[in-house]
Amino acid sequence: MANNVQVTCDPVVLESIAGDIDAALTVTYPEGYFHPKAILSVTPVLVYEGGEVEMRPFMYQGEKVKDNYKTISSAGQTVRERVHFTYEEGMEVARLELRGVASYKAKSINLPVKKVADGVNTTYMLVEKDGYIGYKPDNYQEVLKQTAEGQIRYSVNSSDVASKELSSQSIKDFQAALDEINSNERKSISGTEIVAYASPEGGEKLNAKLSDSRGKSADQAWDKITKGKEVADPEVKSIGQDWEGFQELVAKSDIEDKDLILRVLNMYSDPAVRESEIKNMSEIYTSLKTGVLPELRRARLIANVEYQNYTSDELLKMVDDNIDVLDEEALLRVATLVRDNDKKIELYKKAADKYNSDRARFNLGVTYLAAGDTNRAKRAFESVETKDAELENALGVVDMQNGDYDSALAHFKKSGTNEAKGNTGVINILNGDYAEALNNLKDYQGCCFNKTLAYILNDDLDGATNAMKCRDIKMNYLKAIVAARQGNAEDVAKYIDALKDSKEYYDRAQKDVEFAQYR
């Protein structure tokens, strides 16, 4: 009558969650099956490619047996038990068996083996657990903004350009700069300007007109100054009273009471009141008239220059030929260009040592993580002096890779960054908390693989489909799972075939219980 014993397993396909394989068994013994004096030992066994694992047997006894086992009535009875196994590699292809041994007095007999479940679903193990962590960016500029400048100075209340101004050292330097720009293949002029000013004396309206007139006269002088040079016509601007320049010159001067003047500038916003208050300080005003105000009666001739910095190819070449000329930003940039991890490490170490660069130390830690060296990564992160949210996330990634999930979660909570929230979602998946994982990953801005996986683990196939934004060969694996759960055999075959260039994922698919009915 052993074949009349009914056994069901929930789930029918076993599943590993956080490394645990748990299932509920319901066993119904028919009427007349269990002899009142019999003892039955039932051993759950998980048989897989690497061998088999046995649980301690469930022990049952007939109604007349005086022992401490669970009693089964001869009239028939249903019992419920829970089975538990710890996942081991190879259990993807497995079966759960119940092996019974019936005993009566001194005799025993092996009952027919009952298979109650197939395979172990390990979909959660697809989670990418390297952690979300980015390099600190460099501030390397492919194009450097520069300026070349000359000045025309004016007499009090005058907008006439004196002939000596056209041959002043300032103008000569400006002309030389224009020649150098035209001869330098890395430089180009993006625009030119004339900016005219008046010193803050004599009234706001008068100075506004005077500034306008100086702009016009400087524009006329521009053609003489730039004759024979490849320079576009300038944009002319009139500032009026140059209080900003006045404040800057006073701050740099040796005037004994300059702090008093600066306080007056900050106390009053009305230009007329400012001028009146400063004039009241007669002794100070005399110093201003001779040392500061003449410098503000001017027009600036400006060429805005774009300097083409080293290209990626040039930077890579300089690593081997002339690395010492590279500044901190150039070293940080070229480290992103090299592919060899050891070379990256060398460049980040150089930047850290030569420029005391915190970003280099941080990026060194990220590079060690990429190489799988969590010990050196942790030491590099701990040497970073700037304790920010990104560093907290980085320390959490180290702990996550070392399997210390509690410590990692504490770091991620303290960090609060988008990456930290995504990393929290990864640990949620590893811990079997799929709902919380989706809560943390659904808004993550970055790689969508784990987000898609979280939707699948929550059986939200529409959400998973909508989340599939990444163009990555391994995304075909998740597409195949969605297709399998939707019963789309054609798409299952298509997406598994698309995995052929990835041996790891293609071989896994051949054994994955998700695709069992499609093989």
Image: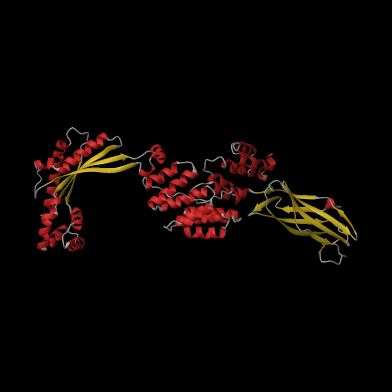
Coloring applied to the structure: secondary structure
In the image: residue 392, left or right of residue 279: right
Q: Which residue: 13% across, 62% down?
A: 277
In the image: residue 379, left or right of residue 217: right
Q: Quadrant of residue 31?
A: bottom right
Taking the view exactly as shown, the residue that stands out farthest to the right is 106
The answer to whether residue 440 is seen in the rendering is no
User: What is the x, y in percent for residue 468?
Assistant: 54, 44
The answer to whether residue 19 is seen in the rendering is yes
User: What is the x, y in percent for residue 24?
Assistant: 72, 56
* In the image, residue 474 above or below residue 16: above
Q: Quadrant of residue 502?
A: top right
User: What is the x, y in percent for residue 48?
Assistant: 73, 48
Quarter of the image containing the C terminus? top right
Taking the view exactly as shown, the residue that stands out farthest to the top is 228
Q: Which residue: 13% across, 54% down?
A: 293
In the image: residue 114, left or right of residue 389: right
Q: Total label count?
A: 0
In the image: residue 459, left or right of residue 379: right
Q: Which residue: 45% across, 41% down?
A: 338
User: What is the x, y in percent for residue 334?
Assistant: 41, 43
